[in-house]
Amino acid sequence: MIYGDTVKPEWVDYNGHLRDAFYMLIYSLTTDAFMDRIGLDEAGRHARQRTMYTLEAHVSYLREIKEGAAVRVDTRVIAFDKKRVHLYMEMFEGEGTEVVSACEQMMMQIDTSGEPKAASFDDEVGANVAAMERIAATEARYAGRVIGLPVRVSAA
Amino acid sequence: MIYGDTVKPEWVDYNGHLRDAFYMLIYSLTTDAFMDRIGLDEAGRHARQRTMYTLEAHVSYLREIKEGAAVRVDTRVIAFDKKRVHLYMEMFEGEGTEVVSACEQMMMQIDTSGEPKAASFDDEVGANVAAMERIAATEARYAGRVIGLPVRVSAA
């Protein structure tokens, strides 16, 4: 699945480029598009009394992006179970083929009929998840990363 | 270091809570405050011709946060070297002591005098980094995480 957007002026920071948090906003809008695709668009959320929450997100910032740039996000599924989806997204600028940023996210379906709680996909949504484009974890170049430096400090 | 903010109406999504990307914006504003503290505030960035870029960010979403909530972010250093800082941030709501979200980030200092390139801290900024509050990696509960599900798909 491809999501497209354009870098808005208000997403640019004092460094003159897309602020880290607004890469994440583009990924967030991408996961909205993913939800639309699996039957959890606005109408689906209300009819099914289901939505999805983000449990965890890892973002790699590889290249700067400037105001007005067109970006596209290629979205694939690394793994899923009855209520969770592990998504892998790569961002590109214009018609470029170099990855400018990547994001993996774990999302979970939530029952919104009362207090929010985890809930399994119904058959239709589950089938839609299973039908999405996939990528093997070993092929997802910027997934599975741990942040670290060789020398760590001692707690003061 | 503590950064404080309040959840703005425009940061709330269709789920009625703080959108994932706007947790990241609060962390982004926290790292701005961190830069202020180490001598890379606006005046320091211009005088030194240095800034910092985010290389990677990992965010854990543990609890929902609603519009108008006061949040505070406790920020400590897990590790640093001559040009990079590995930051660990925990977010709390109001006077609460339960972590509602956590974020680790790798940041790198950049020389902005020409084409942006990595640059070592000068003595003053380096000393300021070394003087920041620290946390051992083993104590940073939500750092070092890998995202994954037990069963992964094969690439279609």
Image (tube, coloured by chain):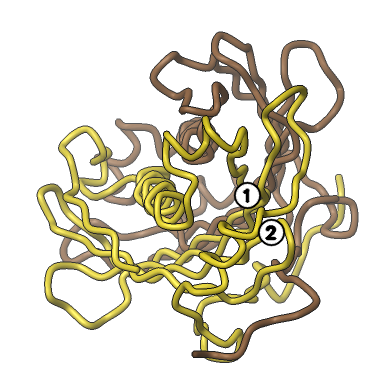
Chain colours: A brown, B yellow
Tell which subunit mark 1 falls on. Answer: A
Using the image as rendered, state which of residue A106 and residue B108 is in the foreground: B108
What residue is shown at x 37% (from left), y 67% (from top)?
A: B101
What residue is shown at x 69% (from left), y 59% (from top)?
A: B84
User: What x and y, as percent, mark residue B142?
Assistant: 51, 77
Asked whether residue A1 is in view, the answer is no
Is B95 situated left or right of B89 in this image? left
Residue type marked 2: Arg
Looking at the figure, which quarter contains the N terminus of chain A?
Answer: top right
User: What x and y, as percent, mark residue B120?
Assistant: 74, 52
What residue is shown at x 42% (from left), y 47% (from top)?
A: B32
Is A118 situated left or right of A122 in this image? left
Q: Secondary structure at mark 2?
A: strand
Q: Name the residue beneath numbered marker 2.
A: B84
Residue type marked 1: Val
Q: Name the residue beneath numbered marker 1.
A: A59
Q: Which mark is residue B74?
A: none
Tell which subunit mark 2 falls on. Answer: B
